[in-house]
Image (cartoon, grey):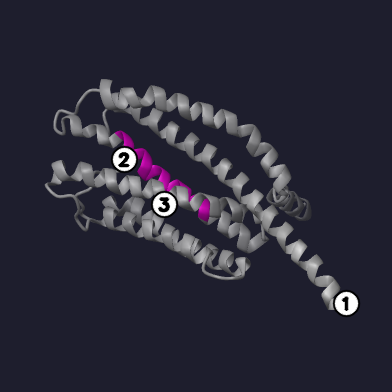
Amino acid sequence: MGASVGQGWNFDVHRFANPTQFMRIANAIFPWAAGLSALLFVVGLPIALVTSPADYQQGETVRIFYLHAPAAYMCMMVYGIMAVGSAAYLIWRHPMANLVARASAPLGAIFTALCLICGMLWGQPMWGTFWVWDARLTSTLILFFLYLGYIALGDAFEDPERGDKAAAILALVGSVNLPIIKFSVDWWNTLHQPSIMSKKGFSVDAGMLLPLFLMLGAFITFYIAVLILRLRSELLAAKIRNARLSQVAVNHAPQAAE
């Protein structure tokens, strides 16, 4: 019984290690993700930025929320995906898991930068300043540096495998920052608003949920579509690199024989 469960688990983990099989599924998903993302942006942006009601306290500035909150969710979700992919790479040597993590890092950095910028633009009229060393703001800034560190560390070694291992370890160590970001408003006395979802339910008005979920869906599907494009590019670059290495080996073989 235990052996069969273990074999089934190994099959599930490794079945998509083959890039061809993985990309066959990814390529089938791509047009749906790209099309749905475009549709959700077309529908969601006008509702979020134009037709949704202004807040009775924050006025029109509340519209920044519909970009800030999805970006905040995405920067944490993408890093979580990177951490899981890094763990699969270190434990099972799963090449596609590592590739997904590497391809996700620049996207996560962009989402985090958008989150921070929107937060500062929103914070200035609400708090009277663009930045405070609030627990959530500070931990989110640390997350941005973790993204940059992961990208830099992966390219810091001549041996790609060493770079991948070092970056994967950093991703796993940095994942301890995710619960700090999530629960910082509960653990410490902060200026930042509470999380959208809590044990008591949604902390925002029901009228804000439709544009919020439309924009969140647009961000998620955008990430999926761009991730697939980046995976295509990374796999093509790997094929070109391997072909060049093979050619170099062929050219040096006659010299070594002499």
SS class of the residue under badge 3?
helix
- Mark toward the start of the polypeptide (2 vs 3): 2
> Which residue is outermost to the bottom?
258
**Callout 2 crowding tier (Cα within 10 Å): few <14, some 14–19, many ≥20:** many
Task: Return the residue nearer the eye: 16 or 144.
Answer: 144
Q: How many numbered dots are placed on residues in this image?
A: 3
Residue 123 found in image quarter: top left
Image coordinates for residue 46, horizontal then vertical, percent: 32, 23
Image coordinates for residue 112, horizontal then vertical, percent: 37, 49
Q: Which dot marks residue 257?
A: 1
Q: Which dot marks residue 51?
A: none
- Mark toward the start of the polypeptide (1 vs 2): 2
Q: Which dot marks residue 68?
A: 2
Quarter of the C terminus within the rendering: bottom right
Location of mark 3 (residue): 109
The mark lying in front, picked from 3 and 1, is 1
The mark lying in front, picked from 1 and 2, is 1
> Which residue is outermost to the left?
128
- Residue 49 lies, with reference to residue 181, above or below; the image says above
Write the residue at 46% across / 51% down.
106
Please name the predominant secondary structure of the magenta segment in the image.
helix
Residue 142 appears in the figure: yes
Tell me the kind of residue under disc 3: Ala
The mark lying in front, picked from 2 and 3, is 3
**Residues under labels 1 and 2: Cα distance?**
63 Å
Tell me the kind of residue under disc 1: Ala
For the residues bearing labels 3 and 1, Cβ distance under 8 angstroms: no
Write the residue at 73% across / 49% down.
18
- Mark toward the start of the polypeptide (3 vs 1): 3
Q: Which residues are magenta?
A: 66-82
For the residues bearing labels 2 and 3, Cβ distance under 8 angstroms: no
SS class of the residue under badge 1?
helix
